[in-house]
Amino acid sequence: MIFYMMYFVLGLLIGSFLNVVIYRLPRMLEQQWKEECIQLFQLPAAQAQTTTSLNLCLPASHCPQCQKPLSWFENIPLFSFLFLKGRCRFCQTRISLQYPLVEVVTALLFVLCAWRFGVENELWLLAGFVFFSYLIALSVIDWQTQLLPDQLTLSLLWLGLLLNWHGGFVSLNDAVLGAAFGYISLWLVYWGFKIATGKEGLGYGDFKLLAALGAWVGWQLLPLIILLGSLIGAVVGITQMIRLKRGKEIPFAFGPYLAMAGGIVLLFGKQIMNAYLQFYY
């Protein structure tokens, strides 16, 4: 029990850092794109000074509304939100529920990994922590911005290949094929849909995310990821349309549902496939 409590606390701490990544990485990319445009169009120096330097470490944590820096106790994961009653200590602006939710979800997934892989399997446990940390960050960023940053998708892909170099979750051959087939499968869907309708139904980030998931779980489980991701996405999408009373114009991010499916498959994919085969055969 003590190990589960430790992993829960570790998950809260990592979740707090993931909130930083979720908030800052899209803004860092936007800043980078602006700087590249300034250089490309050779704008005057006065126009070039339009952004403040931003990275994952600086500036220190602060309220986005009033810009007041946060004290140490306001950075304690989850408990600071409860202590402050969900509001900024200075300007009383509501703090987004995203912050405690990301922390709690991360903590619960860390505990789930410990239960599923066993606390004695340090490599698999660490791999599970890294895998779900990436998926949480990617899911929330995609949900908010319809963007899946290469910095996350590609590094997740390479980590999967390295993990399976000498047989982690799957063999290296299965991991390489999983990465290739994952990318190609959604690439074909993208172009088929675009040729048929003239519209883009997916983003290139979705291809890279599925390739990364394939690098972790192997090519054999890719159909299950696509099936589960599509089912979850369809349920959530239809629910949104009914709730908002809007149609196809609602922006739809497929990344969170691929991530959910990838997490389920990493933990229980082989059991799901075995149950399916036993039921039908």
Image (tube, rainbow, N blue to C red):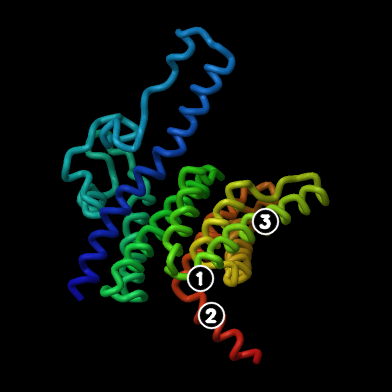
Of 99 and 280, the residue lying toward us? 280
Of callouts 3 and 1, the N-terminal one = 3
Q: Amino acid at mark 3?
A: Ile
For the point 35% across and 61% down, the residue is 129
Which corner quadrant of the image does residue 238 belong to? Answer: bottom right
> N-terminal of the two: label 2 or label 1?
1
Cβ–Cβ below 8 Å for labels 2 and 3?
no
Kind of element beneath mark 1: helix
Callout 3 crowding tier (Cα within 10 Å): few <14, some 14–19, many ≥20: some
Gap in angstroms between the C-alphas marked 2 and 1: 8 Å
Which numbered dot is residue 160? none
Location of residue 90 (image quadrant): top left
Closer to the camera in the image, 127 or 143: 127
Where residue 136 appears, as percent x and y from the top left, is: 43, 55
Q: Are marks 2 and 1 in contact (CB under 8 Å)?
A: yes
Contact flag, marks 3 and 1 (Cβ < 8 Å): no
Q: Residue at x 58, y 63 (%)?
A: 178
Q: Which residue is mark 3?
A: 184
- Relative to 164, residue 88 above or below: above
Amino acid type of disc 2?
A: Ile
Please state if 279 lies on the left or on the right of 162 as rendered.
right
Q: Position of residue 231 (x, y in %)?
A: 62, 67
Comparing labels 2 and 3, the label whose residue is closer to the camera: 3
Mark 1, residue position: 265
Residue at numbered disc 2:
272
Badge 2 local density, few (<14 within 10 Å), some, or many (20+)? Answer: some
Residue name at image x 81 percent, y 48 percent: 195
Q: Residue at x 55, y 84 (%)?
A: 274
- Judged from the image, the secondary structure of the residue bearing numbered disc 2 is helix
Spatial CA distance of label 2 from label 3 is 24 Å
Report the front residue among 117 and 74.
Answer: 117
Residue 228, given in percent of the width and then of the height, sits at 58, 69
